[in-house]
Image: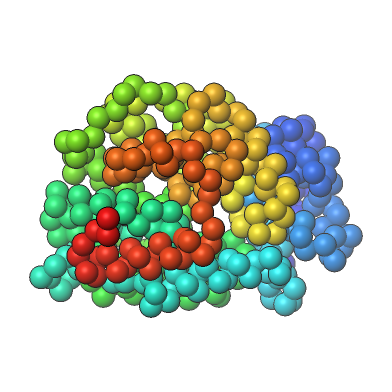
Amino acid sequence: MARMKELEKIIEKCIECGMCVENCEFLSHYATSPRELASRYATGELRDEPQIVYSCSLCGLCQELCPEHLDVGKMSMDLREELVKEGRGPLKGHSFVKKNQEYALSDSFSLVMAEAGKRDCKRVFFPGCSLPGYSPSIVFDCYNHLRENLPGTGIVLGCCGKQTLCLGDRPGFKKVMDQALEALKSLGTSEIIIACPECYSTFKEYGTDLTLTFVSDALLKAGLPESTKGDNRIFSLHDSCATRLEKELQESVRILIRKLGFEIEEMRYGKEKTRCCGMGGMLAFANPKLAGRFTKMRAEEAGHDLLTYCASCREALSNYRPALHILDLIFNHEWEERNGLPPLTGKVRRKNQTKLKAMLMEGYRDK
């Protein structure tokens, strides 16, 4: 079995150096080493504690730090898939994940739209579901800017399915991803401009031969609005763990921020060694207390107000420190007021998703 192979690999190769445990709230909370945790799984000791399996953020930091490149997240994913097959996963708390995703796939939000007057388009803006929930006006203005400067750009609202994949429901994920790919295919799309790091990593792995462009690269190509001018303020930049190995994407974000006229404080745990914000792996729904420790630790690492390029990261980190999304700095003229706002509720995020669809279909911005 794939599960046993992964467990045996960790048990055999882990040298118990402590590097991953020292830097991971999940491992330090549940074990003294990956070997110990894998051994407890292998013997069945933890069989009746599925919450532990779902408490890994799947961020990949353990593999990056491990001298043997062992991946506890991979082991956790294998175990989650087994729990789903046995009917013991996902957990009760994950009902919120299912509810949010069902809404993102419903007629209340989903939309497939070519540029006005056209039936198809080779390029599509795919903002994901988190960013529209955070700010429909930012997505609306960003799309209009891209459409005006990169003619022939359509838009697709929906979900990539990463949430379902993280829960271990691979058949459910395939259904969602197939739906997204079918929407893109219906427009004849070959390039996607993506505004969500999780969507980017998911489409990169499962999106076949599509050309992927992160929104920072697209904006650098399209040019920035003339009204955009920073004040040399310094932000602590949080890298999404989904971009851990995406050096070019991370660099394009930094180029964009500096081009806007702002400065960056590189956090101690950044780029390939970035830490999870607490939302990774749907951890917050399985173990909110542990997720809060992830988030607090990350926020306290920052020396300045935080800047992210993932809407989910922004929402989590704003629990402990003022935080913004990079698109706030371009398309939100009142970003300084938003900087201190707490995260939005699920109800408000769903309302925002519906609002964005209405704005796009009606072609106006609701002031």
Residue at the spot 62% in from the left edge and 47% down from the top edge: 278
Residue at the spot 89% in from the left edge and 60% down from the top edge: 45
Q: In the rendered view, how is the structure colored? A: rainbow
Is the residue 339 above or below the residue 135 in the image? above
* Towards the viewer: 23 or 144: 144
Which percent across, then down, holds residue 289? 73, 49
Which percent across, then down, holds residue 296? 65, 38
Q: Is residue 330 visible?
A: yes
Residue at the spot 17% in from the left edge and 70% down from the top edge: 120
Is the residue 284 above or below the residue 81 in the image? above
Instruction: State the count of labels.
Output: 0
Q: Image quadrant for the N terminus?
A: bottom right
133 left or right of 163 in image: left
Which percent across, then down, holds residue 340? 49, 38
Which percent across, then down, holds residue 264? 42, 25
Q: Is residue 193 visible?
A: no
352 left or right of 290 in image: left
Quarter of the figure with residue 171: bottom right
* Towards the viewer: 364 or 86: 364
Direction left: furthest residue: 117
Q: Image quadrant for the C terminus?
A: bottom left
